[in-house]
Amino acid sequence: MSTQCKSRRGTALGHHKNVKSDRLLERLDSVERRLGKPKGVLADAGYFSADNVQRREAGEITPYLCDHRERHHLPLEERLQSPPPCPVDADAVTAMAHRLRTHEGKQLYAKRKSTVETVFGIIKEVLGFRRFHLRGLMTAQGEWNLVCMAWNLKRMHALAG
């Protein structure tokens, strides 16, 4: 399905298709050339498609592609609950979804959530640092060091309680 958006600058056509899912194969090829064949691939919901899951399993790479957006702040009972057993005749997508809902799958998927992007988001939104005010490499490095010190002090204060 395509969409058409009109604005003062013209018309843009687009497709309701996930562009990230198309790029998974080329990214895996790049990893394989540089590091060798991976045992598994862990990616967010943007890379999910039934075709990607089936291709990864056919290529003997275990896929861990989230098939939906996860809710935040799940109740404790839901977080600790074990999924029902996977059906014996499950297709590749169902088997992968079950694998992600197991305790081991949840632990593995949680690793991809620990990125530095959240730090930059907090520095930008909470600390209000959106641009450098000083010019020149040395002064900008000094300014960045102050921002990092502020972030570290904020974290130490939060962790100390």
Image (cartoon, rainbow, N blue to C red):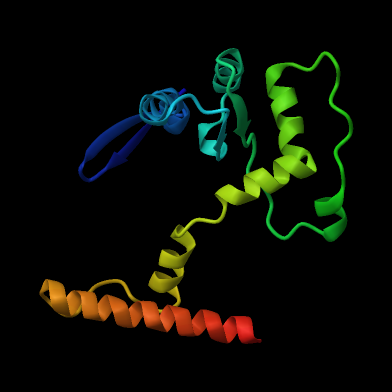
Residue extending furthest left?
136
Q: Which corner quadrant of the image does residue 148 belong to?
A: bottom left
- Residue 102 at what x, y percent from top left? 78, 39
The foreground one among 19 and 149 is 149
| In the image: residue 96, left or right of residue 13 | right
In the image, residue 98 above or below residue 77: above
- Residue at image position (54%, 83%) is 156
Q: Is residue 38 left or right of residue 66?
A: left
Q: From this view, report whether residue 114 is shown above or below residue 148.
A: above
Please determine whether, in this image, residue 152 is positioned above or below residue 74: below
Pick the front one: 6 or 147: 147
Residue 129 picture quarter: bottom left
89 sits left or right of 154 in the view: right
Please tell me which residue is depicted at 84% across the width and 52% down the height of the picture. 80
Residue 42 x, y percent position in the rendering: 57, 37
- For the C terminus, the image quarter is bottom right
Q: Residue at x 16, y 79 (%)?
A: 139
Q: Nearer the viewer, residue 88 or 50?
A: 88
| Corner quadrant of residue 45 | top right
Q: Residue at x 28, y 76 (%)?
A: 144
Residue 131: % across, % down: 25, 72
Q: How many marks?
A: 0
Residue 140, position in %: x, y? 19, 75
Q: Residue furthest front?
A: 36
Compare residues 86 and 138 and report the one nearer the observer: 138
